[in-house]
Image (cartoon, rainbow, N blue to C red):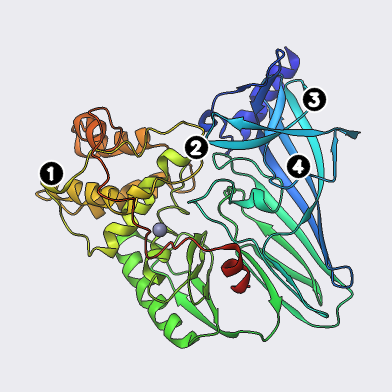
Amino acid sequence: MKTLALIALLLSLSTFANLHQAPPSLNLGRDALGVFVDFKTAHSVLSYDISKRKLTASTKIKFIQESNGKPIFDLVETPTKIMINGKEVSSQTTSLDGVSTVRYLDRTLQAGAHELVIENEITSNLSWSSDYVRSAFWMSDLSDRQYLEQYLPTNLEFDQYENNFEIKILNSEVEHVLYTNGEVTELERNHWQVKYPATFTASSLFYHLSKKGLKDELKKVYKSIDGREIPVTVYSNQSVTRFMNKALSVLAELEKDYGPWPHPQLIIYGAGSGGMEYCGATITSFSALGHELIHSYFARGIMPAHGNSGWVDEAIASWRDSGYKSYSTFSLSKTDMASHSTYKRTTDRRAYTKGMKFIGHLNLKFSKQESFKVFLKNFFSERKFRPFKTHEFQKAIENYYNVSLDDEFNKYIYGKNGIDKEDTTPVENIYHVQLTSKQLRDLL
Ligand SMILES: [Zn+2]
């Protein structure tokens, strides 16, 4: 009873205790239960050994478990060593309702606070040269298990926790440069400490390490409408000025529509192809820049709690791409883009087209009052940095306009009246082109 009271106290004190957004526990067979947990902090030491061409990570995680069971987290690569509360333990992977996979500790733990240490080797998106290394934590929301779990142990997207990195490059005389969306302290040459905000989820973190001088770099300060000075960094093999000028004009546009830029900085890697959003950072082509920047409000400002709410931000970003058009019901399609398994972790691609038109339809529906952008601004400021689910998005619109949208959501989003057949396979979005592993490595 005492422990439970303590946990209740700890949970009530915590701003980012998101277990209410976690999926249901998993039956692991033989009476074993897999339980989702609440990460409080993670601290990783990343060591790049140039001579051995090896990147190792050691991560200490403090987490709270609300009920007895085997704690669930994720890491795609098999850990080399795991300790729980000072004792060595093994891990297993299991299917998440056939739509994804997670890792869990092969030991039943009591409810309470625990300390987990995981060691693993990182091999994705790394390129070794004789005297330097290029490394990035590229992510994607279109393929499964493509967030931080590709590189480091993390929780699923519903959870938010403070992450700290210590990064060391061993056996290299070459100066490296680190682009990342945390608070960076350079301890000495090729040795950094980075602190990421407690609002971050598995999909928030931008991380790119390279040899200094390999790409052009331009830094400017953007004066936010709230008075803050926002450092903007652009680096690219292409024209950094072109990216910078466009970024500054999009920032002004977005602040006018949705309020102050929600992050302490903006980092833009102007890559030749690809596009992915992070909190106040993006890797993007020039044409996708506006699309990726609005994602710092919708996707990495208001954040999806799981795959079923991922359509919202792509629909909104694509609605901006379309020039904020209105659509009548004749343009809409019946879909079930938010009715996948609650365990699904990826975004339904119909969001870019059918989801976009649905948002454009809401714009038409409420156009007598005002642009739907006004609601979106309000939803953004109320819901910022608190992962949400589709039903909460619906409820927020209903409350704002004092209407019921059950018919619209049931028909066009939840698939309760059946779904319209796809004419063709869903088209790939021009802004989020799926890249091969070679293309991803080439972007290092
Ligand atoms: Zn997008």
Left/right of residue 264 with respect to residue 224 in the rendered view: right
Percent coordinates x, y for residue 398 in the rendering: 24, 35
Disc 3: CA contacts within 10 A as few (<14), some (14-19) or many (>=20): some
Q: CA distance from mark 1 to mark 4?
A: 49 Å
Disc 2: CA contacts within 10 A as few (<14), some (14-19) or many (>=20): many
Residue sitting at x 48%, y 42%? 387
In terms of secondary structure, where does tag 3 sit?
loop
Q: Nearer the viewer, residue 261 or 63?
A: 63
Q: Which residue is mark 1?
A: 329
Q: Which residue is mark 4?
A: 61
**Mark 3 or mark 4: which comes first in sequence?**
4
Percent coordinates x, y for residue 212 in the rendering: 70, 83
Q: Disc 2 or disc 4, which is closer to the eye?
A: 2
In terms of secondary structure, where does tag 1 sit?
helix
Left/right of residue 336 with respect to residue 304 in the rendered view: left
Residue sitting at x 35%, y 39%? 337
Is label 1 in contact with label 4 (beta carbons under 8 Å)? Answer: no
Left/right of residue 340 with respect to residue 210 in the rendered view: left
* Image vertical order of residue 388 relative to residue 31, above or below: below
Q: Which residue is mark 3?
A: 107
Q: Is residue 388 visible?
A: no
Residue sitting at x 23%, y 46%? 358
Q: Is mark 2 within 8 Å of ligand 1?
A: no
Indicate the quadrant of ligand 1 in the picture: bottom left
